[in-house]
Amino acid sequence: MKRRFILRSAISFSLMLLLMLSILPFALADSCVDCHTNLKKLKELAPALPEEPKKASHGEG
Amino acid sequence: MAPLEPFEKVYVSDGEFLTSKHNAQGCTFCHGGDNSTNDMARSHKGLVKSPDEQGEICAQCHADIAERSASGFHMTTIGMKNALLDRWNRNKMGDGPKELNVIFDKHCYSCHASCGDCHINRPKGPAKGGLLAGHKFLKTPPEDMTCTLCHSARAGDEYYGQNPGAPADVHIRLAGMVCLDCHKAENALHGPGKELHDRYDNPLLPDCKECHKDVLRGQNVVEQHEIHGDKLQCNVCHSVIAKNCSNCHLQHEETDGKITKRFFKIDPSFMTFKIGRNYRKDREYEYIVLRHPPTNPDLAANYGKDMMSNFDNVPTWKYAAPHNIQRITPQNKSCDSCHGNDSLFLLKGDVVKRERTANRKVIVKDVPKKTGRN
Protein backbone atom coordinates (compact mmCIF):
# COMPACT_ATOMS: atom_id res chain seq x y z
CA MET A 1 0.00 0.00 0.00
CA LYS A 2 2.74 2.37 1.09
CA ARG A 3 4.92 1.41 -1.90
CA ARG A 4 2.00 2.03 -4.28
CA PHE A 5 1.45 5.47 -2.77
CA ILE A 6 5.14 6.38 -3.10
CA LEU A 7 5.17 5.12 -6.70
CA ARG A 8 2.04 7.08 -7.63
CA SER A 9 3.42 10.23 -5.98
CA ALA A 10 6.72 9.88 -7.83
CA ILE A 11 4.94 9.45 -11.17
CA SER A 12 2.69 12.46 -10.50
CA PHE A 13 5.66 14.60 -9.51
CA SER A 14 7.62 13.53 -12.59
CA LEU A 15 4.73 14.31 -14.87
CA MET A 16 4.23 17.71 -13.29
CA LEU A 17 7.95 18.47 -13.58
CA LEU A 18 7.89 17.40 -17.22
CA LEU A 19 4.91 19.62 -17.89
CA MET A 20 6.51 22.64 -16.21
CA LEU A 21 9.77 22.14 -18.09
CA SER A 22 7.90 21.83 -21.37
CA ILE A 23 6.05 25.14 -20.93
CA LEU A 24 9.04 27.01 -19.47
CA PRO A 25 10.50 28.07 -22.85
CA PHE A 26 7.10 29.51 -23.82
CA ALA A 27 6.71 31.31 -20.50
CA LEU A 28 10.14 32.89 -20.80
CA ALA A 29 9.84 33.75 -24.47
CA ASP A 30 8.32 37.18 -23.95
CA SER A 31 10.00 39.52 -26.37
CA CYS A 32 8.48 42.55 -24.61
CA VAL A 33 10.26 41.71 -21.36
CA ASP A 34 13.47 40.69 -23.15
CA CYS A 35 13.80 44.10 -24.70
CA HIS A 36 12.12 46.50 -22.28
CA THR A 37 14.19 45.33 -19.31
CA ASN A 38 17.43 45.81 -21.22
CA LEU A 39 18.43 49.46 -21.28
CA LYS A 40 21.40 48.84 -23.58
CA LYS A 41 19.19 47.13 -26.13
CA LEU A 42 16.59 49.89 -25.93
CA LYS A 43 19.25 52.54 -26.49
CA GLU A 44 20.49 50.70 -29.57
CA LEU A 45 16.96 50.71 -30.96
CA ALA A 46 16.29 54.34 -29.99
CA PRO A 47 16.82 55.87 -33.45
CA ALA A 48 13.97 53.71 -34.71
CA LEU A 49 11.50 55.30 -32.29
CA PRO A 50 9.07 57.72 -33.90
CA GLU A 51 9.17 61.38 -32.81
CA GLU A 52 6.28 62.31 -30.54
CA PRO A 53 3.77 64.82 -31.87
CA LYS A 54 3.97 68.31 -30.44
CA LYS A 55 1.00 69.42 -28.38
CA ALA A 56 -0.49 72.71 -27.37
CA SER A 57 -1.80 73.33 -23.90
CA HIS A 58 -3.09 75.82 -21.34
CA GLY A 59 -6.50 77.17 -20.73
CA GLU A 60 -9.16 77.76 -18.14
CA GLY A 61 -11.94 75.76 -16.60
CA MET B 1 12.07 68.55 -14.84
CA ALA B 2 14.18 67.34 -17.76
CA PRO B 3 12.32 64.94 -20.07
CA LEU B 4 13.56 61.37 -20.33
CA GLU B 5 15.36 60.09 -23.40
CA PRO B 6 12.97 58.18 -25.67
CA PHE B 7 14.51 54.82 -24.78
CA GLU B 8 14.47 55.62 -21.04
CA LYS B 9 10.72 56.32 -21.19
CA VAL B 10 9.94 52.69 -21.95
CA TYR B 11 12.59 51.03 -19.76
CA VAL B 12 10.92 48.58 -17.38
CA SER B 13 13.50 48.74 -14.62
CA ASP B 14 11.32 47.52 -11.78
CA GLY B 15 11.83 43.79 -11.36
CA GLU B 16 9.03 43.59 -8.80
CA PHE B 17 6.53 44.81 -11.37
CA LEU B 18 7.19 41.78 -13.58
CA THR B 19 6.04 39.43 -10.86
CA SER B 20 3.33 41.70 -9.46
CA LYS B 21 -0.42 41.26 -9.90
CA HIS B 22 -0.46 44.17 -12.34
CA ASN B 23 1.61 42.05 -14.70
CA ALA B 24 -0.15 38.78 -13.94
CA GLN B 25 -1.58 38.56 -17.45
CA GLY B 26 1.56 39.75 -19.24
CA CYS B 27 2.35 42.85 -21.26
CA THR B 28 0.09 42.08 -24.20
CA PHE B 29 -3.04 41.88 -22.05
CA CYS B 30 -3.01 45.66 -21.68
CA HIS B 31 -0.75 46.80 -24.49
CA GLY B 32 -1.63 44.41 -27.29
CA GLY B 33 1.17 43.76 -29.78
CA ASP B 34 2.88 40.41 -30.30
CA ASN B 35 5.25 39.07 -27.63
CA SER B 36 6.27 36.01 -29.62
CA THR B 37 8.62 37.80 -31.96
CA ASN B 38 11.78 39.83 -31.47
CA ASP B 39 11.19 41.81 -34.63
CA MET B 40 10.53 45.37 -33.48
CA ALA B 41 7.98 46.26 -36.17
CA ARG B 42 6.04 43.00 -35.86
CA SER B 43 6.04 42.95 -32.08
CA HIS B 44 4.70 46.51 -31.95
CA LYS B 45 1.97 45.98 -34.53
CA GLY B 46 -1.34 46.79 -32.88
CA LEU B 47 0.43 48.16 -29.81
CA VAL B 48 -1.68 50.27 -27.46
CA LYS B 49 0.73 52.75 -25.94
CA SER B 50 -1.61 54.04 -23.23
CA PRO B 51 -4.18 51.31 -22.67
CA ASP B 52 -5.95 53.09 -19.86
CA GLU B 53 -6.80 56.34 -21.68
CA GLN B 54 -10.40 56.18 -20.43
CA GLY B 55 -9.70 53.91 -17.48
CA GLU B 56 -11.42 50.85 -18.95
CA ILE B 57 -8.67 48.40 -18.05
CA CYS B 58 -8.17 49.82 -14.56
CA ALA B 59 -11.94 49.57 -14.06
CA GLN B 60 -11.74 45.78 -14.17
CA CYS B 61 -10.37 45.83 -10.63
CA HIS B 62 -10.81 49.43 -9.48
CA ALA B 63 -14.41 49.90 -10.61
CA ASP B 64 -15.41 52.51 -8.07
CA ILE B 65 -12.45 54.81 -8.69
CA ALA B 66 -12.66 54.36 -12.45
CA GLU B 67 -16.35 55.20 -12.44
CA ARG B 68 -15.77 58.42 -10.52
CA SER B 69 -12.73 59.31 -12.63
CA ALA B 70 -14.67 58.87 -15.86
CA SER B 71 -16.43 62.17 -15.22
CA GLY B 72 -13.52 63.78 -13.36
CA PHE B 73 -11.68 66.77 -14.79
CA HIS B 74 -8.35 64.99 -15.11
CA MET B 75 -10.01 62.50 -17.43
CA THR B 76 -12.39 64.80 -19.32
CA THR B 77 -10.90 68.33 -19.18
CA ILE B 78 -14.54 69.27 -19.73
CA GLY B 79 -14.11 72.53 -17.83
CA MET B 80 -12.15 73.92 -20.75
CA LYS B 81 -14.84 72.85 -23.21
CA ASN B 82 -17.47 74.51 -21.05
CA ALA B 83 -15.41 77.70 -20.99
CA LEU B 84 -15.55 77.69 -24.80
CA LEU B 85 -19.21 76.74 -24.99
CA ASP B 86 -20.27 79.36 -22.43
CA ARG B 87 -18.87 82.00 -24.74
CA TRP B 88 -20.44 80.34 -27.74
CA ASN B 89 -23.82 80.41 -25.98
CA ARG B 90 -24.96 76.85 -26.24
CA ASN B 91 -28.39 77.67 -24.87
CA LYS B 92 -29.25 79.50 -28.04
CA MET B 93 -26.97 77.83 -30.53
CA GLY B 94 -26.42 74.25 -29.49
CA ASP B 95 -23.13 72.52 -28.87
CA GLY B 96 -21.04 74.74 -31.07
CA PRO B 97 -19.67 74.54 -34.58
CA LYS B 98 -17.51 71.65 -35.74
CA GLU B 99 -14.39 73.81 -35.36
CA LEU B 100 -15.08 74.38 -31.69
CA ASN B 101 -15.00 70.66 -31.04
CA VAL B 102 -11.79 70.41 -33.08
CA ILE B 103 -10.27 73.09 -30.85
CA PHE B 104 -11.27 71.16 -27.76
CA ASP B 105 -10.05 67.81 -29.08
CA LYS B 106 -6.76 69.04 -30.45
CA HIS B 107 -5.78 71.80 -28.03
CA CYS B 108 -7.63 71.55 -24.69
CA TYR B 109 -7.77 67.76 -24.53
CA SER B 110 -3.99 67.52 -24.61
CA CYS B 111 -4.23 68.26 -20.87
CA HIS B 112 -6.26 65.08 -20.35
CA ALA B 113 -4.69 62.80 -17.74
CA SER B 114 -5.50 59.10 -17.66
CA CYS B 115 -5.10 56.82 -14.61
CA GLY B 116 -1.62 55.94 -15.80
CA ASP B 117 -0.59 59.57 -16.18
CA CYS B 118 -0.47 59.82 -12.39
CA HIS B 119 0.09 56.24 -11.25
CA ILE B 120 2.42 54.72 -13.87
CA ASN B 121 3.99 57.35 -16.09
CA ARG B 122 4.73 61.05 -16.16
CA PRO B 123 1.93 63.04 -17.79
CA LYS B 124 2.23 62.93 -21.57
CA GLY B 125 1.73 66.62 -22.29
CA PRO B 126 4.18 68.90 -20.50
CA ALA B 127 6.47 66.18 -19.17
CA LYS B 128 6.43 64.26 -22.46
CA GLY B 129 5.67 60.98 -20.73
CA GLY B 130 7.96 58.16 -19.64
CA LEU B 131 7.59 55.63 -16.84
CA LEU B 132 7.66 57.05 -13.31
CA ALA B 133 9.42 54.16 -11.62
CA GLY B 134 10.16 51.46 -14.16
CA HIS B 135 6.45 50.60 -14.62
CA LYS B 136 5.79 50.23 -10.91
CA PHE B 137 2.17 51.15 -10.10
CA LEU B 138 2.40 53.97 -7.56
CA LYS B 139 -0.63 54.31 -5.31
CA THR B 140 0.53 57.78 -4.26
CA PRO B 141 2.04 59.59 -7.24
CA PRO B 142 5.21 61.65 -6.64
CA GLU B 143 3.81 65.17 -6.97
CA ASP B 144 6.95 66.71 -8.45
CA MET B 145 6.76 64.21 -11.33
CA THR B 146 2.99 64.35 -11.80
CA CYS B 147 0.88 67.14 -10.18
CA THR B 148 3.26 70.06 -10.57
CA LEU B 149 4.45 69.06 -14.02
CA CYS B 150 0.99 69.98 -15.32
CA HIS B 151 -0.09 72.46 -12.66
CA SER B 152 3.20 74.29 -12.83
CA ALA B 153 2.81 77.85 -14.07
CA ARG B 154 0.11 78.70 -11.59
CA ALA B 155 -0.49 76.36 -8.63
CA GLY B 156 2.95 74.72 -8.48
CA ASP B 157 5.05 77.87 -8.87
CA GLU B 158 2.83 79.75 -6.46
CA TYR B 159 2.92 77.04 -3.83
CA TYR B 160 6.69 76.66 -3.95
CA GLY B 161 7.39 80.42 -4.18
CA GLN B 162 8.84 80.32 -7.68
CA ASN B 163 7.20 83.58 -8.81
CA PRO B 164 9.09 86.86 -8.39
CA GLY B 165 7.94 88.81 -5.35
CA ALA B 166 5.64 86.08 -4.06
CA PRO B 167 6.70 83.93 -1.11
CA ALA B 168 5.97 80.20 -0.94
CA ASP B 169 2.67 79.13 0.58
CA VAL B 170 2.65 78.92 4.38
CA HIS B 171 1.38 75.34 4.17
CA ILE B 172 4.64 74.18 2.58
CA ARG B 173 6.94 76.61 4.41
CA LEU B 174 5.78 75.89 7.94
CA ALA B 175 3.87 72.64 7.70
CA GLY B 176 5.60 70.82 4.82
CA MET B 177 2.26 69.93 3.33
CA VAL B 178 2.09 68.47 -0.18
CA CYS B 179 -0.67 68.60 -2.82
CA LEU B 180 -2.38 65.43 -1.64
CA ASP B 181 -2.72 66.68 1.92
CA CYS B 182 -5.55 68.95 0.72
CA HIS B 183 -6.45 67.51 -2.68
CA LYS B 184 -7.36 64.06 -1.53
CA ALA B 185 -7.74 61.30 -4.08
CA GLU B 186 -11.06 60.21 -2.65
CA ASN B 187 -12.42 63.74 -3.02
CA ALA B 188 -11.54 66.14 -5.77
CA LEU B 189 -8.78 64.33 -7.64
CA HIS B 190 -10.73 61.34 -8.90
CA GLY B 191 -13.89 63.39 -9.33
CA PRO B 192 -17.20 63.27 -7.49
CA GLY B 193 -18.80 60.85 -9.97
CA LYS B 194 -20.98 63.34 -11.77
CA GLU B 195 -20.33 65.73 -14.61
CA LEU B 196 -19.33 69.18 -13.46
CA HIS B 197 -19.26 72.53 -15.21
CA ASP B 198 -15.86 73.68 -14.00
CA ARG B 199 -13.38 72.82 -11.29
CA TYR B 200 -14.94 75.12 -8.69
CA ASP B 201 -18.25 73.37 -9.24
CA ASN B 202 -16.93 70.32 -7.36
CA PRO B 203 -18.64 69.91 -3.96
CA LEU B 204 -15.65 67.89 -2.74
CA LEU B 205 -13.05 70.62 -3.24
CA PRO B 206 -10.74 71.26 -0.29
CA ASP B 207 -12.16 73.77 2.17
CA CYS B 208 -9.90 75.83 4.46
CA LYS B 209 -12.45 75.44 7.25
CA GLU B 210 -11.98 71.68 7.33
CA CYS B 211 -8.72 72.31 9.19
CA HIS B 212 -9.16 75.90 10.36
CA LYS B 213 -12.33 75.34 12.32
CA ASP B 214 -11.55 78.28 14.58
CA VAL B 215 -12.49 80.71 11.80
CA LEU B 216 -16.11 79.63 11.86
CA ARG B 217 -18.45 82.37 13.05
CA GLY B 218 -18.88 82.53 16.77
CA GLN B 219 -15.62 80.69 17.45
CA ASN B 220 -13.16 83.34 16.38
CA VAL B 221 -10.14 84.52 18.20
CA VAL B 222 -9.38 86.84 15.26
CA GLU B 223 -11.73 89.84 15.18
CA GLN B 224 -11.51 90.24 11.41
CA HIS B 225 -12.84 86.73 10.85
CA GLU B 226 -15.87 87.60 12.94
CA ILE B 227 -16.40 90.90 11.13
CA HIS B 228 -16.01 89.64 7.56
CA GLY B 229 -17.50 86.19 8.07
CA ASP B 230 -18.40 84.55 4.79
CA LYS B 231 -18.43 87.81 2.85
CA LEU B 232 -14.82 87.34 1.79
CA GLN B 233 -13.19 84.36 0.13
CA CYS B 234 -10.30 83.34 2.42
CA ASN B 235 -7.80 84.21 -0.35
CA VAL B 236 -8.95 87.85 -0.37
CA CYS B 237 -7.05 88.40 2.87
CA HIS B 238 -4.56 85.55 2.72
CA SER B 239 -3.23 85.35 -0.87
CA VAL B 240 -0.61 87.52 -2.49
CA ILE B 241 0.28 88.45 -6.09
CA ALA B 242 -0.10 85.61 -8.57
CA LYS B 243 0.46 84.88 -12.23
CA ASN B 244 -2.07 85.94 -14.86
CA CYS B 245 -2.16 85.34 -18.60
CA SER B 246 -3.77 87.09 -21.54
CA ASN B 247 -4.15 87.08 -25.28
CA CYS B 248 -3.70 83.44 -26.15
CA HIS B 249 -4.27 82.72 -29.82
CA LEU B 250 -4.70 79.12 -30.92
CA GLN B 251 -2.72 78.38 -34.06
CA HIS B 252 -2.34 75.55 -36.50
CA GLU B 253 -0.27 74.81 -39.54
CA GLU B 254 -1.52 72.95 -42.58
CA THR B 255 0.34 70.93 -45.14
CA ASP B 256 -1.55 69.71 -48.23
CA GLY B 257 -4.87 70.56 -46.56
CA LYS B 258 -4.07 68.56 -43.44
CA ILE B 259 -3.38 70.07 -40.04
CA THR B 260 0.14 69.06 -39.14
CA LYS B 261 0.89 71.16 -36.09
CA ARG B 262 -1.11 72.85 -33.34
CA PHE B 263 0.28 75.43 -30.98
CA PHE B 264 -0.54 78.76 -29.37
CA LYS B 265 0.87 82.27 -29.20
CA ILE B 266 0.47 84.16 -25.96
CA ASP B 267 1.51 87.45 -24.37
CA PRO B 268 4.04 87.30 -21.53
CA SER B 269 2.35 86.51 -18.21
CA PHE B 270 2.01 89.22 -15.56
CA MET B 271 1.89 89.24 -11.77
CA THR B 272 -0.92 91.00 -9.97
CA PHE B 273 -3.42 90.66 -7.16
CA LYS B 274 -6.98 91.81 -7.79
CA ILE B 275 -10.11 91.58 -5.69
CA GLY B 276 -13.45 91.68 -7.48
CA ARG B 277 -17.16 91.22 -6.89
CA ASN B 278 -18.33 87.64 -6.67
CA TYR B 279 -20.16 86.48 -9.79
CA ARG B 280 -20.51 82.80 -8.91
CA LYS B 281 -23.90 81.68 -7.72
CA ASP B 282 -22.40 78.67 -5.91
CA ARG B 283 -20.33 80.92 -3.62
CA GLU B 284 -21.81 83.21 -0.98
CA TYR B 285 -18.91 85.64 -0.93
CA GLU B 286 -19.27 89.30 -1.71
CA TYR B 287 -15.64 89.69 -2.75
CA ILE B 288 -13.35 87.15 -4.38
CA VAL B 289 -9.82 86.98 -5.76
CA LEU B 290 -9.63 87.16 -9.55
CA ARG B 291 -7.24 85.80 -12.10
CA HIS B 292 -7.10 86.48 -15.82
CA PRO B 293 -6.88 83.25 -17.83
CA PRO B 294 -5.39 83.45 -21.33
CA THR B 295 -8.75 83.89 -23.04
CA ASN B 296 -9.70 86.79 -25.32
CA PRO B 297 -12.30 87.42 -28.06
CA ASP B 298 -9.88 86.29 -30.79
CA LEU B 299 -8.73 83.12 -29.02
CA ALA B 300 -10.14 80.85 -31.72
CA ALA B 301 -10.16 83.30 -34.67
CA ASN B 302 -7.59 81.17 -36.46
CA TYR B 303 -10.22 78.43 -36.75
CA GLY B 304 -13.22 80.46 -37.92
CA LYS B 305 -15.38 83.56 -37.55
CA ASP B 306 -17.65 84.23 -34.58
CA MET B 307 -16.29 81.31 -32.59
CA MET B 308 -16.99 83.27 -29.41
CA SER B 309 -20.12 85.08 -30.47
CA ASN B 310 -21.26 85.33 -26.87
CA PHE B 311 -17.91 86.33 -25.43
CA ASP B 312 -19.45 88.76 -22.95
CA ASN B 313 -21.38 85.96 -21.27
CA VAL B 314 -18.51 85.04 -18.93
CA PRO B 315 -15.97 87.23 -17.12
CA THR B 316 -12.36 87.10 -18.27
CA TRP B 317 -11.28 87.96 -14.73
CA LYS B 318 -12.32 84.77 -13.04
CA TYR B 319 -12.73 83.33 -9.57
CA ALA B 320 -9.36 82.01 -8.44
CA ALA B 321 -7.67 80.41 -5.47
CA PRO B 322 -3.98 81.36 -5.70
CA HIS B 323 -1.90 78.74 -3.92
CA ASN B 324 0.26 81.23 -2.04
CA ILE B 325 -1.54 81.55 1.29
CA GLN B 326 0.15 83.73 3.93
CA ARG B 327 -1.01 84.50 7.45
CA ILE B 328 -0.01 88.16 7.11
CA THR B 329 -0.35 89.81 3.70
CA PRO B 330 0.02 93.41 2.50
CA GLN B 331 -3.79 93.77 2.46
CA ASN B 332 -4.54 92.31 5.91
CA LYS B 333 -1.89 94.17 7.92
CA SER B 334 -4.50 96.68 9.01
CA CYS B 335 -8.10 97.59 8.15
CA ASP B 336 -7.05 100.45 5.90
CA SER B 337 -4.39 98.39 4.15
CA CYS B 338 -7.38 97.09 2.23
CA HIS B 339 -10.25 99.51 2.84
CA GLY B 340 -9.88 102.45 0.48
CA ASN B 341 -6.91 100.87 -1.30
CA ASP B 342 -7.92 101.18 -4.96
CA SER B 343 -4.87 99.28 -6.22
CA LEU B 344 -6.14 96.01 -4.73
CA PHE B 345 -9.51 96.05 -6.48
CA LEU B 346 -10.39 95.38 -10.09
CA LEU B 347 -11.58 98.76 -11.32
CA LYS B 348 -12.94 99.63 -14.75
CA GLY B 349 -9.58 101.09 -15.76
CA ASP B 350 -7.83 97.79 -15.01
CA VAL B 351 -9.83 95.97 -17.69
CA VAL B 352 -9.08 96.34 -21.41
CA LYS B 353 -11.98 98.00 -23.24
CA ARG B 354 -13.08 95.01 -25.26
CA GLU B 355 -13.45 92.90 -22.09
CA ARG B 356 -15.33 95.43 -19.94
CA THR B 357 -18.80 94.14 -20.75
CA ALA B 358 -17.74 90.56 -20.01
CA ASN B 359 -16.44 91.71 -16.62
CA ARG B 360 -19.34 93.96 -15.67
CA LYS B 361 -20.28 91.69 -12.75
CA VAL B 362 -16.80 91.53 -11.23
CA ILE B 363 -15.59 95.12 -11.67
CA VAL B 364 -15.66 96.97 -8.36
CA LYS B 365 -17.46 100.32 -8.65
CA ASP B 366 -17.22 101.41 -5.04
CA VAL B 367 -14.12 100.38 -3.17
CA PRO B 368 -14.91 99.80 0.53
CA LYS B 369 -14.30 103.10 2.31
CA LYS B 370 -11.45 103.73 4.70
CA THR B 371 -12.31 102.92 8.28
CA GLY B 372 -9.77 105.16 10.01
CA ARG B 373 -8.64 102.10 11.99
CA ASN B 374 -5.14 100.74 11.81
Image (cartoon, rainbow, N blue to C red):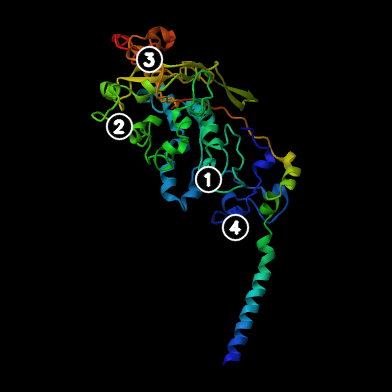
Which of the labelled discs sits on residue B19, or is there none?
4
Alpha carbons under labels 1 and 4: distance apart: 20 Å
Query: As displayed, is residue B260 above or below residue B6?
Result: above
Q: Are marks 2 and 1 in contact (CB under 8 Å)?
A: no
Label 4 or label 2, whichever lies nearer to me, is: 2
Question: Could you tell me if residue B198 is visible in this image?
Answer: no
Query: As displayed, is residue B134 above or below residue B4?
Result: below
Which of the labelled discs sits on residue B214, or is there none?
2
Q: Earlier in the sequence, mark 3 or mark 2?
A: 2
> Disc 2 sits on a residue from what chain?
B
Alpha carbons under labels 3 and 1: distance apart: 40 Å
Q: Nearer the viewer, residue B81 or B118?
A: B118
Residue type, numbered disc 4: Thr
* SS under mark 3: loop
> Disc 4 sits on a residue from what chain?
B
Residue B180 found in image quarter = top left
